[in-house]
Amino acid sequence: MKPYLSHCILLLTGMLCLSVCWHASAQTEPLTLDEIINSELRDETAKQRDQYRHPQQTLEFFGLKPDMAVLELWPGDGWYTELLAPYLRAEGHLIAAHFNPDTKHEYALFFKSSLDAYNTKLELNPDWFDRVEVVAFEPPVTPLPATPGSLDLVISFLNIHNWLADDTFTEVLRQVRLMLKSNGKLGIVDHRAAVSQLIDPRASNGYVNQEWLIQRIVSAGFILVAKSPINSNLNDTGNHPNGVWTLPPTLRVPEGEDKQKYLEIGESDRFTLLFTKK
């Protein structure tokens, strides 16, 4: 089963609740990341994932500032958009490069339902999300519409394995590099394959070899700035019956197996990498 289904189970069940919970009064002044992350307006289900996603440390590692022009690639259900949108709303600019509504991809139904749910979330709370610019991105069918050389930061959370599976990652890197400013940054988080595992260029189990990926990104015209252990999970061996989707939050556990074993492992071991445009 292909990687795009990794978020299907959670997408529709969590989206409406999160949208309603974020319906708040207008933002009257800039908020800090700490205020947003710890806000009572965030749904408890989203907050429960903080222990694995470490949003404040991750975004600070990427060098996020409130006046930046930021592009989030394939934001899915908007878990990070809920933090980025209010943070950048007053002084910055957030572009959400989501799925192509006119896609002919084999997972077109999922792509379209994901995009519709994301847009609904934004529409339900214009006080927070009215300045998010949503654009279509399906490499190589629909390119990034941002102005070349206009972006301070491009970020991707748990998407690389999807583009590797579709053999479109080279095109993603080409477009991202074109849109970044001369000193612009690329921040990436994805599932890390164990070093003992054979390198799979298509990441069929959802895990990506970190050093192999670094070399590929460097070859595309980037410089590695830093690695961070922020999102590491030493309990994850990377060897599960249904790949990374066996673990939470997807929990695609084989019939007859105890989910508790995988809940105790937690979410996947992840690399957190920062690059700059060469």
Image: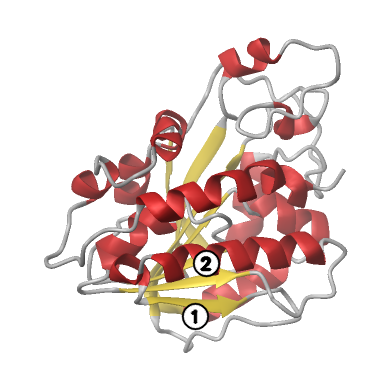
Residue at image location 15% in from the left, 64% down from the top: 30
- Does 173 sit left or right of 153 as displayed? right
| Residue furthest bottom as drawn | 147
Position above or below: 70 against 231: below
Residue at image location 55% in from the left, 71% down from the top: 97
Spatial CA distance of label 2 from label 1 is 27 Å
Give residue 179's mark: 1
Percent across and percent down for residue 184 are: 39, 70
Is disc 1 surrounded by few (<14), some (14 to 19) or many (20+) residues within 10 Å? many
| Residue furthest left as drawn | 29
Is residue 115 visible from the viewing direction of this image?
A: yes
Position above or below: 191 against 88: above
Q: Residue 246 sits in which quadrant?
A: top right
- Does 117 sit left or right of 48 as displayed? right
Choose mark 2 or mark 1, whichever is in front.
2
Percent across and percent down for residue 76 are: 58, 57
* Circle 2 residue: 120
Position above or below: 61 against 141: above
Q: Residue 125 sits in which quadrant?
A: bottom left
Nearer to us in this view, 137 or 64 = 137
Label 1 is placed on what type of residue? Met
- Does 30 sit left or right of 176 as displayed? left
Label 2 is placed on what type of residue? Thr
Nearer to us in this view, 163 or 107 = 107
Q: What secondary structure is marked by label 1? A: helix
Q: Quadrant of the N terminus?
A: top right
